[in-house]
Image (spheres, rainbow, N blue to C red):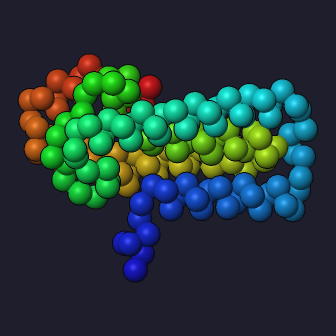
Amino acid sequence: MLRHLDYPPVWLLGALAVVWGETVVAPEMLPWPALTIFGTGIVILAIALFAAAGVAFLRARTTIIPHQMPQRLITDGIFALSRNPIYLADVLLLVGLSLRGEAVSGLLLAPVLVWVLQRRFIEPEEKRLQEAFADEAAAYFKRTRRWI
């Protein structure tokens, strides 16, 4: 059962649930309007990253599902800037919504989410990419950073 829940959106939704809970229980922990505007910008950036990565997966006709073996290695577009733009977008969405909701908990959970995404998803995905694409993956890993 838990294996079926081990996907990045589930981890993100869990963190966002904590943020939402904080906004209900302790509203206005960070009562600065500039943070709300900055948070909105971060949310927009996260959505743009999600969209760009989604289009790249569709064009490449490869799986977006983390636990599956990819059919192709995507190295262009947004993937030329970050090997993991969707995971980066997950963290940015958490931070942006936390700032918009004036919730400190999301800012504290952001490094935890980074750690979970890296250990549970990025590292195993990189192993699968190395197995499937050997030298091409090694060259890509060398020229493109994991996060940003």
Identity of the residue drawn at 9% across and 36% down: 134
Residue 83 shows in the view: yes
- Residue 125 lies left or right of residue 17; in this view the side is left
* Residue 136 to residue 101: above or below: above
- Residue 59 lies left or right of residue 32; in this view the side is left
Identity of the residue drawn at 33% across and 24% down: 77
- Residue 90 lies left or right of residue 100; in this view the side is left
Q: Quadrant of the C terminus?
A: top left
- Residue 31 lies left or right of residue 76; in this view the side is right
* Residue 99 to residue 16: above or below: above
Residue 108 shows in the view: no
Q: Nearer the viewer, residue 63 or 84?
A: 63
Image quarter of residue 24: bottom right
Instruction: Indicate the position of residue 142 as horizontal and vertical percent values.
Output: 24, 22
Instruction: Indicate the position of residue 90 as horizontal and vertical percent values.
Output: 52, 44
In the picture as drawn, the residue positioned furthest to the top comes out as: 143
Q: Quadrant of the N terminus?
A: bottom left
Image quarter of residue 74: top left
Instruction: Indicate the position of residue 137 as horizontal and vertical percent values.
Output: 17, 32
Identity of the residue drawn at 82% across and 55% down: 23
Identity of the residue drawn at 55% across and 49% down: 112
* Residue 101 to residue 24: above or below: above
Instruction: Indicate the position of residue 28 as horizontal and vertical percent values.
Output: 90, 46
Q: Nearer the viewer, residue 110 or 76?
A: 76
Total tally of numbered discs in the picture = 0
